[in-house]
Amino acid sequence: MNEPGKRRIPLVDLLENNNCKIKQASNQLGRGEAILDCSGCREVIPAHKLKILFSGIPNEWQRPQELSNFIDLGTLESNLCNQINQYILLSNNEQINQKNFGRICFLATLLTILFLGAKYVEFLLKPKVGFSSIKIGSMWKPENYVPLADYLQNRLIPNDFFKFLKGERVKVINEGDKTLKYQTAKERILRKEWDIAFTLSPVLSITAKDSAYTFVANMFPDKPTYYRSAIYVRADSKIKSLSDLKPTTVIAMGDFNSVSSFYVPIYDLYGKSLTVKMGFRGQEIRELIEKGKADVGVGAYGDTIQNHSNIRIIHLSKVIPGSGVYLSPKLSISDRTTLKKLLLDAPKEVKKKANYGFGKEVDYQSLVGIMQKTGKVLECADFTKNPVNFFCSFNKSLSKPVQPINITATVNGFSYIGSNIIRLTLEDENSKIYTIVTFINLLNQASNGMSIINLQNKRIQITGAVPKRLADDSFEVIIARPNQIKVLN
C-alpha cells in the first residue's frame, strides 16, 4: 500500500524533463521519499527513459509484487503496466546472466583444460610417427590390404601435438596388384618407394634385404616356411621325366625375377636345351599346359601346382625359402619400431587378409647360391632365340678323380629318369649338393615303400659310393646296391 503524506511525482510531467531530472526523481522514489503517479500516462515510455527511471530503484523492489513501494498502482494503465513488467523481467534476466557469466567462463575454461588434458593423454597413448603418409607395396590383390590400411590409419597419429589437435591423420596408400611385374616391384624396392614391402617372392625378399630393409614378419603363415618348385606336364603327356625333354619341347616359365618359375627351374634343368615361352604368372602357365599350348610348366608346388587329375609332376626341386614383410630404411628407427609393433599386434582377421604373421626370418643363403649359379647360365643363354641352352660351354675338363665317400644328407628334391630310375638331390650340413641316381625299386626297399613326396626333408645315408663331379661343382652318385643307401628318418 502507498503511504499517505509522500510527495507525488506525476509521471507525465516527469517524462518532459531531461535525464538528470528523471534520475533525481528515481533516487527519491528509491529512498521512499515519493510515490510515482501514473495518471494520464497512456503512451509507451521510451526505453532509455524507463531505464533511467528505474536506475535508483532497489533491486528487491523491481518485482511485480513490490511495485507499490514506489508506484501508485491505482493510477497505472494496463499498457504501461505490461511495459513495466516486461522491463523488470528482462532486467532480472540480464542480472542473472551477469552473475552467471563468471561461472560460465570458469566452467568453459575448466572444460577446455579437461578436453586438452584428455587429448594429450590420448596423444601420449597412441603410436606416433614422424611421417604424414606411408605406402604399402605388394604384387597381390589390393583389396586384401584395405583392412590393414584402415587399421594403420586409425591407429597412427603425427608426433606433433598441434597437428594431432587439428585432426590431421597419417595417410596410408596401397600400391600394386596382381598385374605388377616382378621387375617393377624390384625397382620400387631398390628405390625405396615402398615403406612396407609385402615381397611375395623370395627374390624380392633378398632385394629388400640387400637394400637395408628391416624384416618384420613372414608371408603365407599358414604354409610351411619353405616350399618347392615343380616341373610338370599335362596328365596325358608322353613326357615321363626330365630325360624326355628335347630342344623342341615347349616349356612355359615365369619372368626373370620369379624363383619358383624361373631361377630354380633353370638350376634344375641345367644342361638342357628347350623352346621357351616366358613371362607368365603361375595360373597362366598351368592354363597353357592344360590347353596344350606348352608341353612343360613350372611353378610353386602347393600354390597353383599340386597333384591333380589334369597335370602330372615330373620333378620337385630342393626347398625354397619363403618371402617376408619388410620396412624401408627411409623410415626412422623409431618409426620402424612403431610400425613393426603395430603390424604384429594387428587383429587376426587383418593379418589373415594381408597374408602375413609372426615368424623368424628365413635363411636365403642357399637360394642366393642357386641364383648365382643360375646367373652364370643366364650369361650364356639367349632367351631371344629358341631353343635356349640352359648351360654354358667350357673347354676345360671338369673330370677330377675322387674317392669313394660316406655321406649323410637331406633330400631336397627329386626327378624321374625314365620309368625305373630316379634322381634325388641331397644337401649335407655344409650345403654341399649331391645328386643320387638309383633304381626306384631299390629306393622303395631302402625307404620301406615310402612315397617319393614323403621322402622330402628325410635324411639319407650313402655308404661306399663313388661320386662324379658335375659342371656346377655338385656331385652325382650312382647307387646300384641296396647296402649303399639307407633312409634314417
Image (cartoon, rainbow, N blue to C red):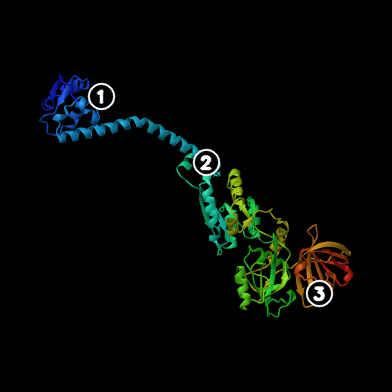
Gap in angstroms between the C-alphas marked 2 and 3: 68 Å
Q: Tell me: residue 375, above or below residue 13.
A: below
User: Could you tell me the amino acid type at mark 2?
Assistant: Phe
Give the vertical position of 105 relative to 279 (above or below). Answer: above
Residue 191 coordinates in the image, percent (x, y): 57, 53
Q: Would you call the spot at circle 1 few (<14 residues within 10 Å), some (14-19), or many (20 or more)?
A: few
Q: Of callouts 2 and 3, which one flags the residue occurring earlier in the amino acid sequence?
A: 2
Quadrant that contains the N terminus? top left
The residue under label 1 is 58
Q: Residue at 23%, 31% (x, y): give it.
A: 64
For the residues labelled 2 and 1, the Cα–Cα distance comes to: 54 Å
Mark 3 neighbour density, 10 Å: few (under 14) some (14–19) many (20 or more): some
Q: Secondary structure at mark 3?
A: helix
Q: Which residue is mark 2?
A: 123
Q: Nearer the viewer, residue 120 or 395?
A: 120
On the question of residue 389 being in view, the answer is no
Q: Going from the N terminus, do you reach mark 2 or mark 1 first?
A: 1
Above or below, 478 relative to 107? below
- Residue 121 in view in this figure: yes
Q: Position of residue 431 (x, y in %)?
A: 78, 58
Gap between marks 1 and 3 measured at Cα: 119 Å
Where 274 sits versus 334, above or below?
below
203 relative position to 85: left or right: right
Q: Secondary structure at mark 1?
A: loop
Please, what is the three-letter code of the amino acid marked with disc 1?
Pro
- Camera-nearest label, 2 or 3: 2
Residue drawn 16% across the image and 33% down it: 80
Q: Give whichever of 197, 373 is nearer the camera.
A: 197
**Mark 3, residue position:** 440
Identified by mark 3, the residue type is: Ile
